[in-house]
């Protein structure tokens, strides 16, 4: 497992979100948004586990959740869930959210389609997903 200083974590995370500076990293650590730091020798360090937590925080904040609700959400999740949320961060890039069209097919299925997709293909995708949900073959 990799270990990082707060400065290194901030540099990595600034590639995902420029607002994730050293001060923000330390603040989130202080208020318990991420697990306590781990000991490596006689130093406290961040690990890949912390990196997943920070990326999950970024992803959830982009959905409009407050820090308090994010903290509650992460507190009740397994590490597997935290990693899953953190891997979804690219889906919440501001340019993607503004450019792509998001369609709610059912309560459980939401799809996002690029504007580069033709109207005909977009309709085929919607129809295929809808048929698959009904248990029919497209």
Image: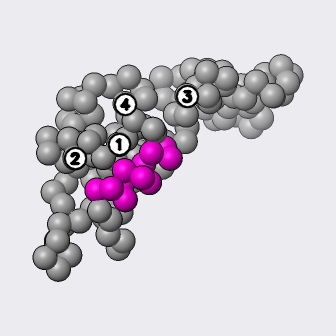
Residue 61 marker: 4
Residue 129 marker: none
Q: Position of residue 130 (x, y in %)?
A: 66, 26
Asked if 87 appears above or below 112 in the picture, the reply is below
Q: Quadrant of residue 122?
A: top right
Which-is-in-front pick, marks 4 and 1?
1
Mostly what secondary structure, the magenta segment?
A: helix
Q: CA distance from mark 3 to mark 4?
A: 12 Å
Residue at 43% across, 29% down:
62
Q: In the image, which residues are magenta?
A: 6-16
N-term-proximal mark, 1 vs 2: 1
Q: CA distance from mark 2 to mark 4?
A: 17 Å
N-term-proximal mark, 1 vs 3: 1
Residue at 55% across, 34% down:
93
Asked if 77 appears above or below 66 in the picture, the reply is below
Q: CA distance from mark 1 to mark 3?
A: 19 Å
N-term-proximal mark, 3 vs 4: 4
Residue at 28% across, 56% down:
6
Q: CA distance from mark 4 to mark 1?
A: 15 Å
* Tag 1 secondary structure: loop
Which-is-in-front pick, marks 2 and 4?
2
Q: Which residue is mark 1?
A: 21
Q: Which residue is mark 2?
A: 26
Residue 94 marker: 3
Q: Is residue 80 visible?
A: no
Q: Position of residue 38 (x, y in %)?
A: 18, 67
N-term-proximal mark, 3 vs 2: 2
Image quadrant in which the N terminus is located? bottom left
């Amino acid at each position: 497992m990799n270990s990082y200083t707060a400065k290194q974590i901030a540099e990595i995370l600034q590639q995902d979100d420029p607002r994730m500076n050293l001060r923000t990293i330390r603040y989130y650590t202080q208020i318990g948004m991420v697990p306590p730091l781990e000991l490596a020798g006689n130093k406290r360090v961040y690990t890949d586990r912390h990196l997943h937590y920070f990326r999950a925080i970024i992803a959830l904040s982009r959905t409009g959740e407050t820090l308090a609700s994010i903290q509650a959400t992460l507190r009740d999740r397994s590490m597997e869930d935290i990693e899953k949320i953190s891997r979804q961060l690219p889906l919440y890039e501001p340019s993607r959210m503004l450019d792509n069209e998001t369609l709610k097919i059912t309560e459980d299925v939401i799809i996002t389609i690029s504007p580069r997709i033709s109207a005909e293909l977009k309709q085929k995708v919607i129809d295929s997903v809808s048929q698959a949900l009904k248990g029919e073959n497209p």
